[in-house]
Image (tube, helix red, strand yellow):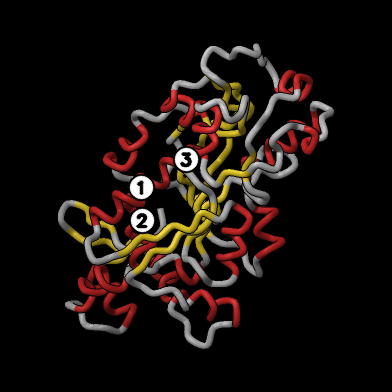
Amino acid sequence: MDKMLTTREVAEFLGVHEKMIYSMITEKGLPASKVSGKWLFPLKLVEQWVLSKTVNLPAASRASAQVREDVLVVAGSNDLLLGRVLALFMAENPGLLAAFANLGSLDGIRALGRGQCQVAASHLAQDNGEEFNFAFCREELDVLPAVVNLSRREQGILLPSGNPQRIGSVTDLARQKLSVVNRAAGTGTRLLFERELARAGCNPASLPGWDRVVRRHLDAGLAVLSGQAQAAPGIRAVAGLLGLDFLPVAWERFDLLIPRDRYFDKPVQLLLNLLHEDRCKALAADLQGYDLSLTGKTVFPKE
């Protein structure tokens, strides 16, 4: 384990009065853990926190400083669990605002690069299908962000209850040319859908309804439920909530991406701490297709 500092030691390290440390925990996001009623401070995280407060930052870092410190801005991929987590964040932290911009994974990363948010939500699968988000971050950002997992979740195809067309694979979907609704370009769900159709030898644009785009997983499910479409890419949780059939395609890692210079901002730390709470994990109790075994764990840099 990394070296832990006491309150007196961290005060000496920072060159401040010991009494100031307590306000720095609550007001400045100084990383700390309370063990048996006593505060302890991981030296490594304290050092990172100090570096995050550096002035005269490069242009990319200056852009991220535009975000207000009493507002948590999350941009990127739509997710049912994330919506519930942000609602809990608001309930637990009166006076702080949590705002979500439903841009899709890729545009969420781009918003992060422009300094328009503190957190990007992304689940972009790389070509090997085993790793997520890093290749896209390298293309769009000057420096890789910290990556904290929200969940693993199951992606697939939403189908009418009873699966009347007897769809057993993406190949069947392509062969029968069922009408679909789609997700926006740059979303992780659409990229996965396009990849699976290409593997099945199908030109995605040949599917009826390919250009009909919805912004949320729930809207895709409602289109299938109402008969406006015979299939749609989406997550198992929506199928469970709406009573739809579901053709599984892949499990994915849904991550929160955070610039290094925003990592210790108070609202970001409150969000990350919340991910470890049982009341947060209980939010997925009625949602199918979620795996919370990695929730709150730092994927990069490795702990």
- Please indicate, yes or no, whether residue 132 appears anywhere in the rendered image: no
Disc 1 secondary structure class: helix
| The one of 47 and 201 positioned closer to us in this rendering | 201
The answer to whether 16 is drawn above or below residue 135 in the figure is below
Picture residue at 29% right of the left edge, 49% below the top: 88
Disc 2 secondary structure class: helix
Amino acid on which the number 2 mark rests in the picture: Leu
Tell which tag, 3 or 1, sits nearer the viewer: 1
Q: Residue furthest bottom?
A: 56
- Alpha-carbon distance for marks 1 and 2? 8 Å
Amino acid on which the number 3 mark rests in the picture: Ser
Residue 151, numbered label? 3
- Alpha-carbon distance for marks 3 and 2? 14 Å
Residue 271, numbered label? 2
The answer to whether 182 is drawn above or below residue 137 in the figure is above
Amino acid on which the number 1 mark rests in the picture: Val
Counting from the top left corner in percent of width and height, residue 294 is at: 46, 40
Counting from the top left corner in percent of width and height, residue 148 is at: 48, 51
| The one of 170 and 150 positioned closer to us in this rendering | 170
Residue named by callout 1: 85
Picture residue at 33% right of the left edge, 53% below the top: 273
- Please indicate, yes or no, whether residue 23 appears anywhere in the rendered image: yes
Q: Earlier in the sequence, mark 3 or mark 2?
A: 3
Q: Earlier in the sequence, mark 3 or mark 1?
A: 1
Determine contact: label 1, label 2, CB under 8 Å.
Answer: yes
* Crowd around label 1: few <14 · some 14–19 · many ≥20 (10 Å): many
Counting from the top left corner in percent of width and height, residue 59 is at: 60, 82
Picture residue at 58% right of the left edge, 45% below the top: 123
